[in-house]
Amino acid sequence: GEDVEQSLFLSVREGDSSVINCTYTDSSSTYLYWYKQEPGAGLQLLTYIFSNMDMKQDQRLTVLLNKKDKHLSLRIADTQTGDSAIYFCAENPGGSYIPTFGRGTSLIVHP
Amino acid sequence: DGGITQSPKYLFRKEGQNVTLSCEQNLNHDAMYWYRQDPGQGLRLIYYSQIVNDFQKGDIAEGYSVSREKKESFPLTVTSAQKNPTAFYLCASTRRGISGANVLTFGAGSRLTVL
């Protein structure tokens, strides 16, 4: 199976909260990341969380980490049309510095 | 401003031709990477390089080649041996040796289409 799994699509209404979920397999990953990719562009780091943390908040973004279940989520409050993009979850498996990416979740925000 | 520059943005190739994608960074990063992105498949690692004059194969290296003669540059050649080269190619870099998160900086990508 894949190392990092994400659902492929999420559709939300503008102003609602979006929650993008990710599961990973390597419990030794020390950092977990969320990247954002806008159409036709490269990826940009949104945020990351150290494995000894449960939660990290940065303005409209909240990251929750459940190490026991190897589950990571990204919550975007007050979702805007500009948040429409592909969101990638990533980990550094086995202590490797090379990240493994999920397939990405396409977030579609409609009026 | 520091960053990664990929060129060309769009490239068309006839079957049987080799093409080279350029990747240049002025971030003084040690490590550089090439990823291939196909719809619904996420990012797959082609090659990576940790230092000058050294590089390793990633998960899908067949049909590709790279060089790392300078710290700033990591060009990718898509050879005629690559059976399905039409894709979006992303170059990235990161600084090694710093404890903590390994955050990648990405270029804007190059879209290769085989005619």
Image (spheres, coloured by chain):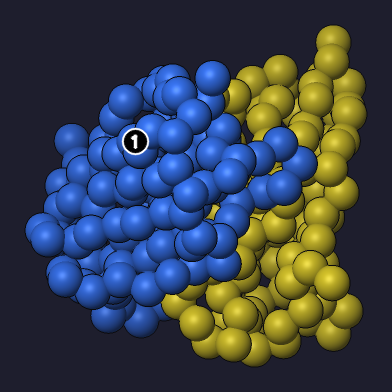
Chain colours: A yellow, B blue
Q: Secondary structure at mark 1?
A: strand
Q: Nearer the viewer, residue B91 or A75?
A: B91
Image quadrant where one finds the C terminus of chain B: top right
Q: Nearer the viewer, residue A73 or B29?
A: B29
Horizontal and vertical percent for residue A44? Answer: 49, 43
Q: Within the image, what quadrant is residue A53 found in?
A: bottom right
Left or right of residue A57: residue B30 = left
B63, above or below B47, in the image? above
Which residue appears at 52% of the width and 47% of the height? B82
Screen quadrant of the N terminus of chain B:
top left
Looking at the image, residue A7 sits to the left or right of residue B85; the answer is: right
Q: Is residue B101 visible to the viewer in this orientation of the structure?
A: no
- Picture residue at 45% right of the left edge, 77% below the top: A97
Q: Residue at x 71, y 57 (%)?
A: A102
Residue B10, image x and y in percent? Answer: 41, 21
Residue behind mark 1: B19
Measured as percent of width and height from the top left, residue A88 is found at 66, 50
A88 relative to A37 in the view: left or right: right
Task: Examine the rendered structure and indicate whether residue B85 appears above or below residue A71.
Answer: above
> Mark 1 belongs to which subunit?
B
Q: Residue furthest front?
A: B16
The amino acid at mark 1 is Val
